[in-house]
Image (tube, coloured by chain):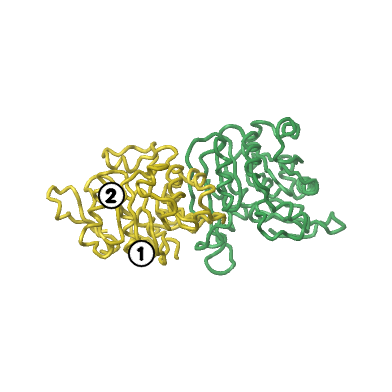
Chain colours: A yellow, B green
Amino acid sequence: MTSSADTADKAGESTLDAFHRGAFHLVQPRRGHRAGMDAMMLAASVPGSFAGRLADLGAGAGAAGLAVAARCPDASVALVERDAGMAVYARRSIAHEANAGLRDRARVIEADVTLTGKARLAAGLVDGAFDFALMNPPFNAPIDRPSPDVLRRSAHVMEDGLFERWLRTAAAIVRPRGGLSIIARPGSLPEILTAMQGRFGGAQIMPIQPRAHEHAIRIVVRAIRGSRAGLVLMPALAIHEPAGHRFSQQADAINNGRATLFGD
Amino acid sequence: MTSSADTADKAGESTLDAFHRGAFHLVQPRRGHRAGMDAMMLAASVPGSFAGRLADLGAGAGAAGLAVAARCPDASVALVERDAGMAVYARRSIAHEANAGLRDRARVIEADVTLTGKARLAAGLVDGAFDFALMNPPFNAPIDRPSPDVLRRSAHVMEDGLFERWLRTAAAIVRPRGGLSIIARPGSLPEILTAMQGRFGGAQIMPIQPRAHEHAIRIVVRAIRGSRAGLVLMPALAIHEPAGHRFSQQADAINNGRATLFGD
């Protein structure tokens, strides 16, 4: 990712950031939660052959959803974001001339992912309407030191039962045999697996480790709506080379939209 | 492991097998479920400093429990096995002169792990009586092609809700802050994590992979009775070198009682 000032923004509160070596751009708040490798790894879990409708739940400025749109020419993406301020950034990202190639395949749904019943339908989160859902929920446990920045705290602090509520919506809006990917902390695995029961199966768990010999700091869980297949624990992705801060070849390729996380 | 005929057995139905480069021996049935690397990896999850009372739940001929007794001089082990035939082998293993160094620290409890109430207590599975429990439950899912051999089938075929029943007993017999280790297939992870809820925490999950770039075929889950700590996903153990069938250095050391699985 390369970042520059957003020239349309006189007050200097936003930046324009290039992802996937310039294949798409994000308009983001200079302060607060900023998209990075988490969003790129989540987007990379979508198979290269994906075509259809994808919902990016908790989209922020749209990094994960737009990364899929940039990589998969037959994907259309809905960026679902409840925070009005972040939804503005998502709309500005879509509208930016640097994203002209995917502008017609992206839209914003300003809605809380945890809406239920008629309120969910009215927001456009319609039953079976999507072929794939991405979930990048606020996954810093409350035990963590809260960020001093309000926007960042809103995007990072986890609520109890969050995965249950988010997966209830994901199960409703994804068609049978459609896909789901979640990025989360390893500590959330019990809650995720519980919430997936009876909704999603055939789960593949990809541990993300800083280095090959360190424990995982993230997991990406990919699953299939209505599948009864068992869980698979994949070989981990190491972000860095064994020594130093250099990205591993695989992580660099994933970060730049050149490789997929599950190799499909 | 090196295997030879059991000279005390005129009918030739059993073998005497050396483990940990001769540090302990097992008398095993020639046919049926035979102990191997699963039991050694499970035993290797017990820290080197362990001292106290350990229960090996589903002990078979006693491989995992006796491996701990051989490696930890201040450990005493109870081999819990419901199958009368296998319990005979466990007793013969303990009594064998090759195990003279650990004979006084090992005993057999012939009982079903899933006993409840007074029946469990009467069998010797007393509340809080153990500092650590090992679980090597029958973990081949029923979907697998059943083995033609009855003893092997009995040891491998999984029953529904098995982890819930085994973990209920483990939670009863392990003292607060005591340890638990389970070896299982990755597909059992949802059931294991659900059954651990409110009983064991601070789980460490160790994926066991045939090779570094292949998905896990086993997991070892280690946890602490009553802990509220979160789950940790460890870097995987690869059994073989990247090419060929040669054991990795780490797997060979674990298999021979020279290293522990979690490095403690």
Q: Position of residue B77 (x, y in %)?
A: 69, 40
Q: Residue at image x 51%, y 52%?
A: A200
Element at badge 1? helix
Which residue bears the numbered disc 1?
A: A253
Tell me the mark number nearer the camera, choosing from 1 and 2: 2
Which residue does the numbered mark 2 point to in the structure image?
A: A34
Q: Residue A1 appears at what percent x and percent y?
A: 27, 58
Q: Which residue reaches farthest right?
A: B10
> Tag 2, which secondary structure?
loop
Q: Is residue B217 left or right of residue A31?
A: right
| Image quadrant where residue A46 sits | bottom left
Crowding at dot 2, Cα within 10 Å, few <14 / some 14-19 / many 20+, comes out as some
Asked if the residues shown at circle 1 and circle 2 are in contact, with their CB atoms under 8 angstroms apart, the answer is: no
Where the N terminus of chain B falls, by quadrant? bottom right
Residue sitting farthest toward the left: A10
- Check disc 2 and give the amino acid type: Arg
Tag 1 subunit:
A
Q: Is residue A37 above or below residue B110?
A: below
- The front one of A65 and A80 is A80
